Image: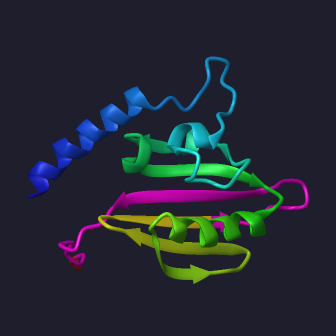
Amino acid sequence: MKALLVPLFVALALQGCSSTPLNTASGDKVQATEAVGPSALPPGAVLKPEQSLIMGAGEQWVGRVVAEVGKDVEGAYRFFIDTYPAQGWTLISAVRGKTSLLVFTKQDRTATVEMSEGTLMGGGTMALTVAPRSAAVAAPKRP
């Protein structure tokens, strides 16, 4: 089974790299919604392409998106709590604090959102990781 997963992952990675531009020709930051769709991230989120990896596109993308969310981290948190269930995602876990964590599932996918509050000088950041969900995952073995 592992022998089949490696080539599949490599193929998806190559397809994602060729079909999802994260940087403009000038090296400017890209609006995050251009990469993963308008309903995936809070309004105004700005992608950090050097920290992001997106494979695929549209509703079936997988990977990790890191973005700046500005000073309204609370608004970004509310965006996920309000918007994702309306899109068919089920909230599994929510932790609110200086670093907040949300876990959602939808059919055969999981989404994990980690948000960190900013400092006095800068705004907050978030990382959204979307991956396939598998019920056949084995527990790690001890060495």
Which quadrant of the rendered structure holds the C terminus? Answer: bottom left
Q: Is residue 79 left or right of residue 140?
A: right
- Location of residue 133 with respect to 54 vertically, above or below: below
Residue in the picture at 58% in, 74% down? 101
- Location of residue 47 with respect to 75 vertically, above or below: above
Residue in the picture at 63% in, 71% down? 82
- Total marks drawn? 0
Residue in the picture at 19% in, 47% down? 6
Whether 29 is among the magenta residues is no
Which quadrant of the rendered structure holds the N terminus? Answer: bottom left
Whether 135 is among the magenta residues is yes
- List x then y, in percent, for residue 129: 47, 58
Q: Which residues are magenta?
A: 115-140
In this view, the residue in front, 58 or 126, is 58
Q: Is residue 77 left or right of residue 54?
A: right
- Location of residue 39 with respect to 22 vertically, above or below: below
Residue in the picture at 57% in, 52% down? 39
In this view, the residue in front, 83 or 45, is 83
The image quadrant of residue 117 is: bottom right
- List x then y, in percent, for residue 100: 65, 74
In this view, the residue in front, 131 or 57, is 57
- List x then y, in percent, for residue 84: 54, 66
